[in-house]
Image (cartoon, rainbow, N blue to C red):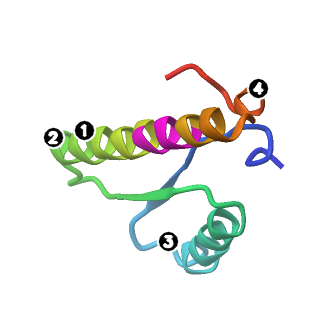
Amino acid sequence: THARAGVDGIIHLAPFGCMPETTVRPLIRAIGDAHDVPVLTLTFDEQAAQSGLDTRLEAFADVLHERRRTLFDLARTTGTAGRVHTSL
């Protein structure tokens, strides 16, 4: 899976009011949980504000950045640094 290939997170874009989304959302969350990959779900309608989107994406990027740093530090202290992506 992509999670095993080094994916840091999942951004799930969902249209507001889409009924199939009620099935897909829990599946994506379960995949993220199963592979220890953070998931950000963004629901859109025609009224979605750009500033709110920017804030949520920036916060998610900060979470991913800190998670990558923590994993790298852990790998370095345990001697497994070669198995972790080092670019931040």
- Residue at (66, 27) in percent of width and height: 85
Location of residue 88 in the rendering, given as x and y in whole percent from the top left corner: 49, 23
Amino acid type, label 2? Ser
Q: Are the residues tagged 2 and 1 within 8 Å (C-beta)?
A: yes
Residue 18's disc number: 3
Residue 51's disc number: 2
Closest to the camera, between mark 3 and mark 4, is 4
Magenta extent: 66-71
Q: Is residue 81 magenta?
A: no
Q: Which residue is mark 1?
A: 54
Judging depth in this view, the residue of 66 and 46 nearest the camera is 66
Q: Quadrant of residue 19?
A: bottom right
Mark positioned earlier in the residue sequence (2 or 4): 2
Query: What is the distance, in whole Å, between disc 3 and disc 2 at their CAs?
Result: 23 Å
**10 Å neighbourhood of mark 1: few (<14), some, or many (≥20)?**
few
Left or right of 73 in this view: 47 = left
Judging depth in this view, the residue of 7 and 28 nearest the camera is 7
The answer to whether residue 64 is above or below residue 17 is above
Q: Secondary structure at mark 1?
A: helix
Query: What is the distance, in whole Å, between disc 3 and disc 4 at their CAs?
Result: 43 Å
Q: Are the residues tagged 3 and 4 within 8 Å (C-beta)?
A: no
Amino acid type, label 4? Gly
Residue 82's disc number: 4
Query: What is the distance, in whole Å, between disc 2 and disc 1 at their CAs?
Result: 5 Å
